[in-house]
Amino acid sequence: MSETATAADLANTIYLTLPFGRVTIVLRPDLAPLTVQRIKTLTGQGFYNGCEFFRVIAGFMAQTGDPTNTGTGGSSLPNLPAEFTTQASFLTGTLGMARTNDPNSGNSQFFICFAPATFLDDKYTLFGQVTEGMEFVDQIKKGQGQSGRVTDPTRIVTMELAA
């Protein structure tokens, strides 16, 4: 691999540090350029550091990215338009943008899939993939009931741009 390719790859790589270890995430600007830019902007600002995985459903996904840790908060930036795709599927380790019933309401909250969730395909913005450290994602504390609300949730230690 050339040095240029390595630099380009690192420009779209995020390191998510959990209490259990470091997770490597490769972003997909080819699928969701606006969402990837938002995630990179917020990550660069330290926005995600300390955020809780407040909604975690075993066998499905872990959701974070709300500074209020209530599921209703977001960044001060405007909401993003949906960037749905049929070019990739929600599989184990896929990252998607959380939203309300309005497809154009993604802002800062995102989720990581514990298992394939192809029923989300072309309904949620897919913007990244865990490439290393999925065993640490699997250790995120699971919530209770259908809502997946978590008591004493796992927090992001740091979320940083690789380059």
Image: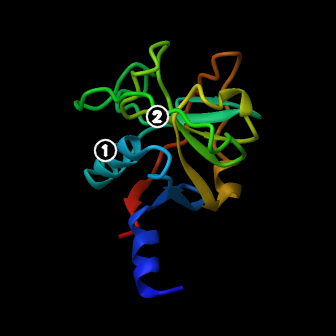
* Residue at the limit of the structure toward the left, as seen here: 76
The C terminus: image quadrant: bottom left
Which labelled disc corresponds to residue 47?
A: 1
User: Type of residue at label 1?
Assistant: Phe
Q: Which residue is the extreme one toward the front?
A: 86
What residue do we see at 55% from left, 29% from top?
124
Q: Could you say where residue 112 lies in the image, as x and y percent from the top left?
A: 60, 41
Q: Is residue 19 left or right of residue 81?
A: right
Question: In this view of the protein, can residue 48 be seen by the observer?
Answer: no
Classify residue 31 as left or right of residue 37.
Answer: right
**In terms of secondary structure, where does tag 2 sit?**
loop
Percent coordinates x, y for residue 74 in the rendering: 33, 28
User: Residue 135: which quarter of the image?
Assistant: bottom right
Tag 2 residue: 83
Sequence order check: which comes first, mark 1 or mark 2? 1
Q: Is residue 124 above or below residue 5?
A: above
Kindly tell me whether residue 50 is visible in this rendering: yes
Dot 2 surroundings within 10 Å: few (below 14), some, or many (20 or more)? many
At 67% from the left and 56% from the top, the residue drawn is: 134
The tag on residue 71 is none
Q: Secondary structure at mark 1?
A: loop
Disc 1 vs disc 2: Cβ atoms closer than 8 Å?
Answer: no
Q: Residue at x 36, y 30 (%)?
A: 107
Query: Taking 163 as reference, is 2 left or right?
Result: right
The residue type indicated by label 2 comes to: Glu
Q: Residue furthest bottom?
A: 2
The answer to whether 150 is drawn above or below residue 20 in the figure is: above
Residue 9 drawn at (x, y percent): 46, 70
